[in-house]
Amino acid sequence: MLSPAIAQTVIDHALSLGADFVELYVERQLRSTLNTLSASVDSVQSGVEFGIGLRLVFGHKVLYGYTNKVGADELRRIASELAAKDRRDPVTQASAFNFITSADQHPAEKRLSQDAQLDAKIAYLLAASSAAFAGGSAIHQTKGACLQREQQIEIFNSEGLHVQDVRHYVRTSLTAIASDGSDQAVGADNFGGLLGWEVADQHSAATLGAQAARQALVNLSARPCPSGTMPVVMGNGFGGVIFHEACGHLLETTSVAKQASVFHDQMGQQIAHTKVSAVDDGTLKNAWGSLNIDDEGMPTQRTQLIQDGQLTSFLVDRLGSAKTGYARTGSGRRESYRYAPASRMRNTFIEPGPDSVEAMIASIDRGIYASHMGGGSVQPGTGEFNFSVQEGYYVENGKILYPIKGATLISTGPKVLREISMVGDNFSLACGMCGSVSGAIPTTVGQPALKVDAILVGGNA
Amino acid sequence: MTQHKQDANNTAQKLAQVIFARVQQAGAEADLIINEGSSLSLKAQGGQLDEQVVASTFIVGLRVVLGEQVGAASSEATDPDALNFMVDQALANAHHSAARPSERISPLAGELIADSADLNPADDSTMDEKIGFIIDLERQLSARPQIRNVPYNALVDARQRQQILTTSGRYADQSSAQVVAYVYPLAEQGERTAMAASVAYARSFRELDGARLSDRAYADTLALLGGHPLKSARYDVIFSANVQPQLFGAFSLMWSAKAAQDKVNPLRDKIGTLIMDKRLSLVDEPLNRTGLGYRLFDDEGSATAAVTLVNRGELITLAHNSATAAHFGVANTGHAARGAKSPLTVGLHQLQLQPGPDSQATLHQGEYFEITQLDGLHSGTNAISGEFSCGASGYLCYDGERRSAVRGVTVAGNLYQMLHQIVAVGDQSHWNDSRHSCMASVRFADLAVAGS
């Protein structure tokens, strides 16, 4: 996308201004979005994004700029503008580029650049909608979506790196709305991966629609959630969003290096119950959060974050490595050329354990089974988090009594890690989008069901 | 108009000329959004500049209407091949869309231009001044007692320009500037820690008051550090001037005629009925220049105007774009919302909750929970059912006096029901920090708070 000759002149120029390290990140992205409303197509959008991000590093200081223009003059101008306050005699020389084609570990067949597959996607979403309406007469509306992206990247740096990669993302979702005349409730399901439209073969339209409808109908019959501190069983799959938010973000050197993480000085210490082991793995084949290389050009890897409750690794990008001394883990990520990379998660999960969900529920006198978690957020400096429950049930004397609505869980990451007393055997993954300092990126969360002995549940009962 | 602006206008009009010629050749009509911007972002750490980002953006978004079908495409490149590809994509997308007879390109013509010194002031500050500002802010706040550091901080100086052109001859153009500074100091006392965000917004760098921002961030963070959970119970609640607009914003679907057309807006059949307490009136005022959300036109290029949504509790109208207005057979209220990369919908501009009849003494009488922060609004709300459940912090107050700081609690309710369960509506209104909403304080009755 960018000629090596232009990249070389820009890097040489930036180094002549005294930069310690220079990097060019070139990106071209195709995007196709389809939305349906019940049995009709609501909107069809597509687009092309292109730009170049230029990063100069002076010591630990990052100077970053970007442009839509390819010319060497524009890139040199940005470098000069960025370095205006830090200009000094050169401290290093550029290495010659050594071109590497990254091995494609995540093959995609039905690629956006070949065919947007709009007819097939429309048929899929309308079939999902039909399946949802078939779920019950109270279903009165559905909203479907399919997003496919093809992101082509090229990275050059002053250490001689020149690498290219292409990433194929696709994600489908269906939301069902149920109504009984006075109340309305929502259910949803989604599926995605780092692959092409063949994703439709992995998660059928019927499954997508039926799951969304089932959840909407459950929520329509739900009662307000009781509140107070109580045990909670968190369901598998997207339940892992709590670990992602409450702990994963605190293990990124983006927070650790600033001592803005409660775990910044706890490497090697027991930070979780001994039943808890956690991983961030960028290598899972065709998984939503996987990569061949990270956005600094390093091959991605599997990183054991916690082993038997002991903190074993942080997630480390180039600058995080320079600031903390920990080795890079292939975790430098960014939404697009508009962002400088930062240490971020990929596919992050708690590993399976020996317990069954049934045993967890049976162990509760009064508490909640949060079978499907919604979203949430965390304050990295304190570890405080909040999460909504998308589908949940009130449990008493070891039995599920009724579905609940309007439940929120709040606690802190360090506290909840120690309160996990049972780890399930029903491990699964789910995809989501993670927003942070370097933009919104695809990440997978996952876990088996977990029992947390005490957590504050907010509700309106 | 400066020579630069004139050149930019010509560039936009030349682009539109090329694109519209190809669109019209295909028998379609179209509108074009051109968004361009530039920004500078500075962050400090340890008394030094930590990150500097210089950005310029340009994107073209095309919407075509071919018969009764609508398609859209966008491009960040403006070379002829890229523009032709964008047009072809938009037309191909239209062929796949369902018939949308109410969605037409606005027949409006003529110019609407907003580019005045109050919206887009000249910047006479230097880079050194801006770097000095963020370094001083971070260094001085870090040096205050009980503050460990200020890990998250920034000064962002941004300028945006939006141009809208249509095949019918409309040209709309608005430029604006906004400067934002934020700090998240991390306080500690023994094993207790706290972090509270403080943000300041202005049109120009010169308007920012770093000392005030620092003082507010310090006070809020120390208060949070000393906070404790409330006893679980039902409390009267007053949301702060920043939080109340956030809560209304999370439920903005209730004003959306697009959501009504899609049959997901619970207020879709409530025009002319009481949807809230009679002391409440809500007006969207896009032309109020005190606010930073001033808009002369919406994203279809339709002129905006003040629109009363609720008058004394009665729903007067929903927010409409041209398509929803045609669908329902009512007037367009100038609330079209469309991005270069996103489809047409509706959105409010500057929502105002009018002052009510109750004195500040009445509003603050006895015990209530003043909520100054709601966590998880993006995930803990259901705009279709009205329910919300979020983490909260603030102060337990009595007769207007903050008696104790509160943290580590949840608050839950149903906004649509709460709007009927009002204790008082204050006789003064206040802008939020981002100056996108100005609201009177409302005291809501008996919200469920879970804590200790």
Image: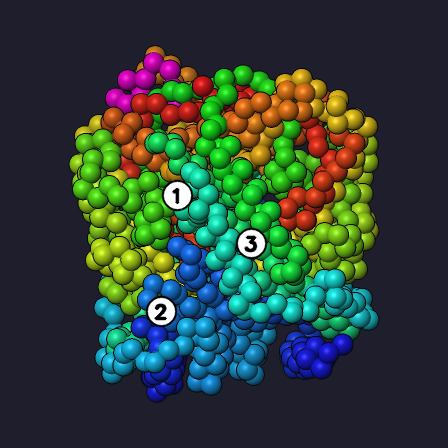
Is residue A360 covered in magenta? yes
- Tell me the distance, in whole angstroms, between the alpha carbons under discs 3 and 2: 24 Å
- Tell me the distance, in whole angstroms, between the alpha carbons under discs 3 and 1: 20 Å
Are the two marked residues, 2 and 1, in contact with CB atoms closer than 8 angstroms? no
Label 3 resides on the chain identified as: B
Of badges 2 and 1, nearer the viewer stands 1
| Residue labelled with disc 3 | B181
Disc assigned to residue A306: none
User: Is B443 situated above or below A100?
Assistant: above
Label 1 resides on the chain identified as: B
User: Is B144 situated above or below A346?
Assistant: above
| Residue labelled with disc 2 | A57
Are the two marked residues, 3 and 1, in contact with CB atoms closer than 8 angstroms? no
Disc assigned to residue B148: 1
Residue A328 or A91: which is nearer the viewer?
A91
Q: Label 3 neighbourhood size at 10 Å, few (<14), some (14-19), many (20+)?
A: many
Percent x, y of residue B145: 44, 39
Q: Quadrant of residue B208?
A: bottom right
* Label 1 element class: strand
Percent x, y of residue B131: 51, 63
Percent x, y of residue A213: 48, 36
Q: What amino acid type should be assigned to the residue bearing mark 3? A: Ala
User: Is A348 situated above or below B230?
Assistant: below
Would you say residue A292 is visible in this rendering?
Answer: no
State the residue at coordinates (28%, 17%).
A363
Are the two marked residues, 3 and 2, in contact with CB atoms closer than 8 angstroms? no
Of badges 3 and 1, nearer the viewer stands 1
Residue A304 or B403: which is nearer the viewer?
B403
> Which residues are the magenta region?
A357-369
